[in-house]
Amino acid sequence: MKTIGMLGGMSWESTAEYYRLANEFVRDRLGGFHSAPILLDSLDFAEVEALQSAGDWAAAGELLAVRARRLQDAGADLLVLCTNTMHIVIERVEESLHIPVLHIADATAAAISAADVSRVGLLGTAFTMEQAFYRERIESHGIHVSVPDEDDRALVHRVIYDELVHGIVRDESRAAYQRVVDRLVERGAGGIILGCTEIELLLTQADSPVPVFPTTAIHVAAAVDAAVGPALTP
């Protein structure tokens, strides 16, 4: 079994889900006492958030590249960034390593295609919804991506940074997100990407009239497939 390198802490709330899910998936796949071989480096999110707010993506990319190399040098066989937003600097991370880096958008696009969905709405941070790096990666797989309008984008972003990254999950925010989802569906979305790893703390499939694509769970499943081998289908 290969060792999964996890670069997390962005935020630690969702990184804890990465760790939990990876171990559950390996346990369910292999049985017995099996768990996932993981090397985890958890950054101080305050440092990362300050670089995000300043728009200093070059410094952010260098920070993540340095920490990713530590995981590689410690023995990781593959790497996942436990975040959607910071895939904005994925190329800087990739060029600093010789181990595979599993891109969260590629894994998500594969799940969307497998569900036979061709038009999706994207929820995430303002960086993820408004910049091209994520939407274009999904669209390169032949999937149309739409984002909420400006007011809804601001609401989605605020809930992530003011509540979810601090472990605050409010029913009022869930209801507000459901209204955003409904408006995306009215515009033709046949599925919804939960494109921030913390959103899965708030929304589940039960909260949406169309399929949701939880990027944390999807990304972890891809990492486990790479570490253990894909699950056998009946």
Image (cartoon, grey):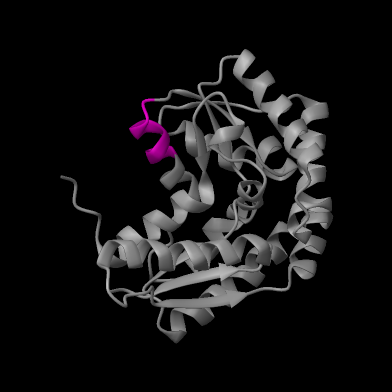
Q: Is residue 210 left or right of residue 125?
A: left
Residue drawn at x 38%, y 70% as measured from the top left:
99
Toward the bottom, the furthest residue is: 74
- The x and y percentages for residue 154 are 82, 36
Residue drawn at x 84%, y 52% as measured from the top left:
162
Q: Is residue 172 left or right of residue 234?
A: right
| Magenta span: chief secondary structure | helix
Residue drawn at x 25%, y 55% as measured from the top left:
230
- The x and y percentages for residue 93 are 53, 65
Q: Is residue 217 left or right of residue 181?
A: left
Number of labelled discs?
0
Residue drawn at x 62%, y 60% as measured from the top left:
14
Quadrant of the rendered image containing residue 27: bottom left
**Quadrant into which the N terminus falls:** bottom left
**Chain part drawn in magenta:** 109-116
Q: Name the one closer to the observer, 104 or 63.
A: 104
Instruction: Assess whether residue 110 is covered by the magenta stretch.
Output: yes
**Quadrant into which the C terminus falls:** top left
In this rendering, the answer to whether 199 lies above or below 77 is: above
- The x and y percentages for residue 83 are 60, 56
Residue 75 in view, yes or no:
yes
Q: Is residue 138 left or right of residue 179?
A: left
In this rendering, the answer to whether 178 lies above or below 57 is: above
- The x and y percentages for residue 102 are 43, 57
